[in-house]
Image (cartoon, grey):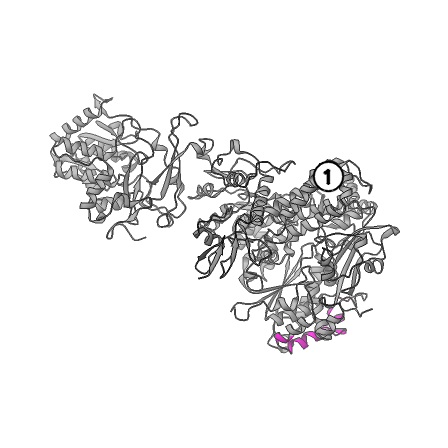
């Protein structure tokens, strides 16, 4: 365990640690471009040069193993001058696209140039021209002029996805980043290269020209697209200017979580947020003589109470969703057990997406809260689901409550038709308009994951928090509030006023959550008690 | 006048054949080396004060001792025949005329470092030398001087001829290794050094063609006798290449310590047309230029270092009064810009920027601040990169800008007293595309 | 595999195997195999890159990176004869530029260009290692020629053009 001195401060590190990492432990951030903790060392940007006593040449700290007794200067005149020189060289042929470049505001080159006082260029010649705005794949746009050849993207595709679509072709100043002729940057994790790229050489089509990043607020949350629960940042723009149409959520980016997703997330999750702002159910509605009529929540609750209150509970089926949060499911469970004794309650509905995983981050289970539903004792079996569907088809269901599912892709049109035609009254709680919502006798709009606090338990048995990034659109309410209102109207009022309070209640009753606290979950989540979910 | 070692029989036709080599006592030095321990061979080479003839001039014997004895991995010997330093052509002659001498030296070196496999890396343009070396390897293997068991000893050496494909950076040790491994010639981060972790992560020694060609003579004469042929700290004879404005360009085998002025006036026949000498690059293009009155210097590492330049590859390029130094600087800068591998920022951008500034100045479109800018950029490129190509670019260019500032100032005013003032069009022609090495 | 790629692999497999034979690790034979392609097809097309990638079991990426890095490989078709004029210091001092001018005028193409009949490409290259015979020229991978003069340059072009006509 060598001990070395960096900027006058001592630190002891494990054998093999680089000077760069050793400095980090002291809170000293040496600037880098090509270095990334999850990728191999390249040492080509030459930004991390430090002065080491007794060594004549400056050393790249990312590639220099810490040695006993080493004395390192990070901010000596010589080191800073070298860093400044490296940035000036990077800026030499760099097209000053900032006014039209998506990366502006989160660009390492901008940041470092400003920090090192490089405000004027000494390069007065014609800059090297290379391909710009190249459609490199389904999601990625490539600008070879902006590229500073750090190679992070190439190493990511070599070492992490092992798909190797990008390369650095040519030699010297004429080097170009690109895909070989005839190939595409097309793999389930392609979006990560845009996060990795320190400049705007690799950007995402979905975000191109949509918003300036300094208008984006970031909220820590969790991706709802599968049981992995990759930690994400929901980035939203709710300013009255500088936005695109009525969009509020502009992008999801991965947050680092060593235990869940590392630095990455898959493309399906990354780009799967449009449903938050598009095609939403605007308000509660009651179907009267074939046409849905918007009503107030009070009227909607009254209608629901009427339907459920007058039905034989054994002829009520509730199709819960494992895409709902623990809080939603807990209150649904409490409502059903208190007010609908004998009803069929199933959380076993399959997702409408094929149950295929990739052995990396994508889980075959496309629900984010299966482990949570199980921990609450809800029936998540295929069997239970099948029985509910059959009961409906047989005409054995007087009131069918569907939470979130569009039965048409899930069951196929034929089956879906049978179910919806033979079921008595249909109540749908949904975020987005669908073929199923069109058949609802009572339609209740509920909040999307980005619009509410809540918790999921992922497939690795980790409880993680969603945080509200934007308010629910229209009159949507989080599901748990619907169940809370209903239990109240049935005479079993619930006192919890927030998701946090619901969680506290769950922690008292649900073995898997015993002793856990809302605040204790933090931004990285905590493991649940006992064998919930499968082992990582 | 010392007895010639490497070039002694070059005048004879067929000197490249095995028969000719054997007739002159070829492969007996190898036999002697194989009767010694690897350590004893290394000692002899250390005594010879042989320094790498590729350009770095690092003591060969010392370099061999960096190979760890206990790594458990195979040790490789790699012959660097990627001669690409402008002004240098000696290795080509050695390959064309005495290929067996190199192979014998290669085997001696392999024995000294306990290597059983060798890679002979020849630059792609050297088709005829590659043919000669290839045939020599076949001849030697058939006759038992290379291959499974040499002289019936436990020593054997498998030799693979590897062709480069046109990249100066593959003359850099680790760039060469990257190329042998089947990739682009990108140099690797050091440490680890090749002697510890080189080809395929195994201990590797890369030696220059001429360095290896010296080894049979060191074994035959003895280390001390070889050292005595040179001068203190610079053992033996060296192959000097002279080209440019001389009457008799060529390769001359001379003792280290011979004076530069004497080499130019003597075997190289003096400046052509009896003109005045203006400038000399003493050790290949990566060395600082010397003015005419700096040429009374001993050609050895220390003496040249004292003048702020280097022995390098001992490739002497001579410029007379008709040479335009601005153009010379530009031609040199173009070379490095074209050959930079592109891996690291200062070199990739710096070499290109400097070349373009020089083009601009050469074409009469320069600005006064350009000169100091070039010097600053040279400084910014130096000592900050993965390999020393950038330093190799900075050194000659900055030396010419400093020592011939007057000519640059003339160009800024639209004049050229050397008489060569290219039209703006020509100087502006970005002719990188012509020479390939990129799309 | 598209037809071009497979055809090339079928046709060149024996040559590829010969080139790769000395290498214990197949991917190390990449440069050697590309030399075969360059010699046979005159340039390294995307289909040829595919064939090489298939043969060596490496990614297309790796092949394209190497094919675009080295001066002797070209990834676009060019002339049957590559006229390479050295442009480094000693050759420049002794008149390399004049050789280029003669060739440009005679062939009617710019530096880096190819004649319409596909016979010649004109390239300027870095130090060939023939400074003792400066200014030097290399035609394809033939032995270096030099010292060249504007006249001998002109003559060389005539001779090569004549060979094509007769041969």
Main SS of the magenta part reads helix
* Residue A491 pos. (x, y %): 11, 32
State yes or no: residue B35 in magenta.
yes
Q: Nearer the viewer, residue B322 or A476?
A: B322
Residue range (magenta): B15-40
Q: Report the side of C125 relative to C146 (left or right).
A: left
Relative to B408, say whether B44 is above or below: below
What residue is disc 1 on?
A: B361
Quarter holding the C terminus of chain B?
top right
Q: Quadrant of the N terminus of chain B?
A: bottom right
Where is residue B208, by image quadrant?
bottom right
Q: Is residue A171 among what the camera can see?
A: no
| Residue A218 pos. (x, y %) | 38, 36
Nearest the eye: C117 or C143: C143
Left or right, residue C42 beside residue C102: left
Q: Position of residue A13 (x, y in %)?
A: 44, 58
């Amino acid at each position: 365990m060598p001990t070395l001195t960096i900027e006058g401060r001592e630190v002891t590190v494990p054998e093999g640690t680089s000077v760069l990492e050793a400095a980090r432990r002291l809170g000293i951030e040496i600037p880098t471009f090509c270095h990334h903790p999850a990728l191999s060392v390249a040492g080509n940007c030459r930004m991390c040069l430090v002065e080491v006593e007794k060594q004549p040449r400056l050393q790249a700290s990312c590639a220099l193993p810490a040695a006993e007794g080493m004395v390192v200067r990070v901010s000596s005149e010589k080191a800073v001058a070298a860093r400044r020189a490296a940035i000036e060289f990077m800026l030499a042929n760099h097209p000053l696209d900032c006014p039209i470049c998506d990366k502006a505001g989160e660009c390492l080159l901008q940041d470092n140039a400003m920090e090192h006082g490089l405000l004027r260029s000494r390069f007065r010649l014609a800059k090297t021209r290379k391909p710009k705005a190249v459609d490199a794949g389904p999601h990625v746009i490539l600008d070879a002029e902006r590229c500073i050849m750090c190679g992070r993207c190439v190493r990511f595709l070599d070492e992490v996805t092992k798909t190797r679509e990008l390369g650095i072709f040519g030699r010297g100043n004429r080097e170009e980043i690109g895909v070989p002729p005839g190939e595409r940057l097309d793999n389930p994790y392609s979006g990560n290269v845009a996060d990795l790229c320190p400049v705007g050489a690799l950007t995402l089509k979905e975000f191109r020209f949509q918003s300036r990043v300094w208008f984006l607020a970031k909220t820590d949350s969790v991706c709802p697209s599968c049981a992995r629960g990759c930690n994400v940042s929901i980035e939203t723009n709710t300013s009255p200017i500088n936005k695109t149409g009525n969009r509020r959520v502009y992008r999801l980016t991965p947050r680092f979580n060593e235990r869940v997703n590392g630095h990455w997330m898959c493309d399906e999750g990354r780009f799967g947020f449009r449903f938050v702002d598009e095609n939403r159910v605007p308000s509660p509605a009651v179907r009267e003589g074939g046409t849905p009529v918007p009503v107030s929540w009070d009227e909607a609750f009254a209608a629901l109470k009427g339907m459920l209150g007058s039905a034989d509970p054994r002829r009520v089926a509730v199709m819960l969703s494992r895409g709902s949060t623990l809080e939603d499911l807990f209150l649904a469970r409490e409502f059903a057990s208190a007010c609908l004794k004998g009803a069929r309650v199933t959380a076993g509905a399959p997702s409408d997406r094929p149950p295929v995983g990739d052995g990396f981050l994508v889980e075959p289970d496309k629900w984010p809260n299966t482990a949570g539903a199980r921990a609450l004792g809800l029936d998540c079996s295929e069997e239970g689901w099948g029985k509910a569907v059959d009961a409906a088809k047989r005409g054995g269901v007087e009131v069918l409550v569907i939470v979130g599912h569009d039965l048409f892709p899930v069951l196929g049109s034929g089956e879906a038709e049978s179910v919806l035609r033979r079921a008595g009254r249909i109540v749908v709680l949904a975020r987005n308009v669908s073929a199923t919502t069109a058949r609802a006798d009572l339609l209740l709009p509920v909040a999307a994951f980005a619009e509410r606090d809540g918790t999921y338990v992922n497939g690795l048995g980790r409880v993680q928090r969603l945080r509200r990034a934007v308010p629910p659109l229209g009159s949507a309410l989080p599901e748990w509030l619907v169940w809370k209102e209903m239990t109240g109207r049935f005479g079993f009022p619930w006192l919890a006023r927030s998701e946090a309070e619901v969680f506290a209640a769950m922690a008292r009753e649900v073995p898997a959550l015993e002793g856990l606290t809302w605040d204790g979950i933090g931004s990285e989540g905590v493991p649940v008690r006992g064998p919930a979910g499968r082992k990582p | 006048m010392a007895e010639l070692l490497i070039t002694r029989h070059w005048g004879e036709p067929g000197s490249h054949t095995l028969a000719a080599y054997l007739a002159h006592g070829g492969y007996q030095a190898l036999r002697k080396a194989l009767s010694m321990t690897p350590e004893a061979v290394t000692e002899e080479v250390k005594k010879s004060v042989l320094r790498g003839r590729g350009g770095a001039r690092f003591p060969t014997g010392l370099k061999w001792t960096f190979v760890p004895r206990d790594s458990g991995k195979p040790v490789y010997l790699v012959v660097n025949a990627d001669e690409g330093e402008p002004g240098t052509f000696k290795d080509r002659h050695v390959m064309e005329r005495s290929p067996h001498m190199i192979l014998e030296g290669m085997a001696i070196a392999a024995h000294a470092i306990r290597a059983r496999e060798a890679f002979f890396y020849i630059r792609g343009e050297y088709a005829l030398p590659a043919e000669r070396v290839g045939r020599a390897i076949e001849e030697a293997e058939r006759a038992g001087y290379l291959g499974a068991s040499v002289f019936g000893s436990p020593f054997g050496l498998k030799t693979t001829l590897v062709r480069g494909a046109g990249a100066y950076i593959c003359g850099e040790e680790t760039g060469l290794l990257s190329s042998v491994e089947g990739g682009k010639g990108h140099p690797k981060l050091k440490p680890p050094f090749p002697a510890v972790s080189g080809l395929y992560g195994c201990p590797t020694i890369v030696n220059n063609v001429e360095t290896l060609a010296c080894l049979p003579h060191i074994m035959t004469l003895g280390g001390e006798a070889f050292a005595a042929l040179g001068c203190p700290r610079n053992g033996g004879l060296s192959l000097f290449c002279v080209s440019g404005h001389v009457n008799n360009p060529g390769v001359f085998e001379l003792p280290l310590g011979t004076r530069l002025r004497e080499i130019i006036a003597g075997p190289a026949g003096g400046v052509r047309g009896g003109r005045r000498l203006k400038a000399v690059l003493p050790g290949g293009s990566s060395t600082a230029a010397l003015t005419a009155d700096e040429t009374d210097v001993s050609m050895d590492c220390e003496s040249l270092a004292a003048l702020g330049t280097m022995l390098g590859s001992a490739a002497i390029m001579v410029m007379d009064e008709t040479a335009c130094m601005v153009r010379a600087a530009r031609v040199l800068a173009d070379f490095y810009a074209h050959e930079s591998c592109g891996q690291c920022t200062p070199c990739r951008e710096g070499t290109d920027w400097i070349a373009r500034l020089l083009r601009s100045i050469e074409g009469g479109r320069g600005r006064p601040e350009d000169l100091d800018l070039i010097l600053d950029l040279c400084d910014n490129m130096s000592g900050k990169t993965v390999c020393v190509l950038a330093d190799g670019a900075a050194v000659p260019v900055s030396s010419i800008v400093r020592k011939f500032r007057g000519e640059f100032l003339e160009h800024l005013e639209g004049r050229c007293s050397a008489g060569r003032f290219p039209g703006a069009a020509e100087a502006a022609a970005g002719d990188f595309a012509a020479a390939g090495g990129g799309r | 595999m598209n037809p071009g790629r497979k055809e090339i692999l079928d046709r060149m497999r024996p040559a590829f195997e010969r080139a790769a034979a000395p290498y214990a690790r197949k991917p190390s034979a990449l440069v050697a195999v590309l030399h075969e392609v360059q010699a046979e097809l005159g340039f390294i097309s995307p289909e040829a890159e595919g064939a090489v990638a298939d043969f060596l079991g490496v990614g297309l990426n790796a092949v394209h990176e190497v094919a675009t890095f080295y001066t002797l490989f070209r990834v676009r078709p060019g002339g049957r004869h590559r006229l390479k004029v050295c442009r480094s210091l000693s050759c420049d001092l002794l008149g390399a530029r004049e050789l280029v001018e003669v060739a440009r005028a005679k062939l009617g193409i710019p530096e880096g260009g190819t004649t319409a009949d596909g016979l010649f490409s004109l390239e300027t290259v870095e130090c060939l290692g023939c400074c003792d015979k400066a200014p030097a020229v290399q035609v394809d991978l033939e032995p270096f020629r030099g010292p060249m003069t504007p006249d001998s340059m002109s003559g060389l072009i005539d001779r090569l053009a004549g060979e094509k006509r007769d041969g």
